[in-house]
């Protein structure tokens, strides 16, 4: 079983910055996908950014140039640096990690979510 703990959310003014972290723990053999999603009230969950094995990244058009996803393989941790935040970035942010365990089974785990609120 693989557990995720995502942290770093909070209240920030428009134009401000936040850094989200998501640490994976458990019997992890390999991680091949790490990503961030978000869900605003009344809306469906949407992809924000992903990073695959190595350094291949992908971003939603709405966050390109403002958000940066990165990973620390030694710590099984993925980060989301969010700059120039806008009120429309307000949402609960969830991390998602996929890979395989030491028993050869695949896993697809989600964090509990962290609230990001951008407001004056």
Image (cartoon, rainbow, N blue to C red):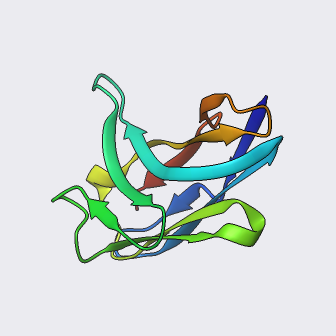
- Residue in front for this viewpoint, 76 or 10: 76
Query: Is residue 10 shown above or below 111?
Result: below
- Residue in front for this viewpoint, 116 or 102: 102
Query: What x and y, as percent, mark residue 37?
Result: 41, 43
Query: Is residue 1 shown above or below 115?
Result: above
Locate residue 59: give its quadrant: bottom left
- Residue in front for this viewpoint, 92 or 80: 80
Number of numbered labels in the structure image: 0
Identified at 47% across, 75% down, the residue is 17
> Quarter of the image containing the C terminus?
bottom left
Locate residue 52: give its quadrant: bottom left
Query: What x and y, as percent, mark residue 42?
Result: 30, 22
Residue extending furthest toward the top: 42
Locate residue 87: give its quadrant: bottom left
Query: What x and y, as percent, mark residue 115?
Result: 55, 44
Query: Is residue 103 shown above or below 55?
Result: above
Residue extending furthest toward the left: 61
Identified at 42% across, 61% down, the residue is 51
Residue extending furthest toward the front: 104
120 lies left or right of 87? right
2 lies left or right of 85? right
52 lies left or right of 66? right
> Quarter of the image containing the N terminus?
top right
Identified at 29% across, 25% down, the residue is 44
Query: What x and y, as percent, mark residue 64?
Result: 22, 69
């Amino acid at each position: 079983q693989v557990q995720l703990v995502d942290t770093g959310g909070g209240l920030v003014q428009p134009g401000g910055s936040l850094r989200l972290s998501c640490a994976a723990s458990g019997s992890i053999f390999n991680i091949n996908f790490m990503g961030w999603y978000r869900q605003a009230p009344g809306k469906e969950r949407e992809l924000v950014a992903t990073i695959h094995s190595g350094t291949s990244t992908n971003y939603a058009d709405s966050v390109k140039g403002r958000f940066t996803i990165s990973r620390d393989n030694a710590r099984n941790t993925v980060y989301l640096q969010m700059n120039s935040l806008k009120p429309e970035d307000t949402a609960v942010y969830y991390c998602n990690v996929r890979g395989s365990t030491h028993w050869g089974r695949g896993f697809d785990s989600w964090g509990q979510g962290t609230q990001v609120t951008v407001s004056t």
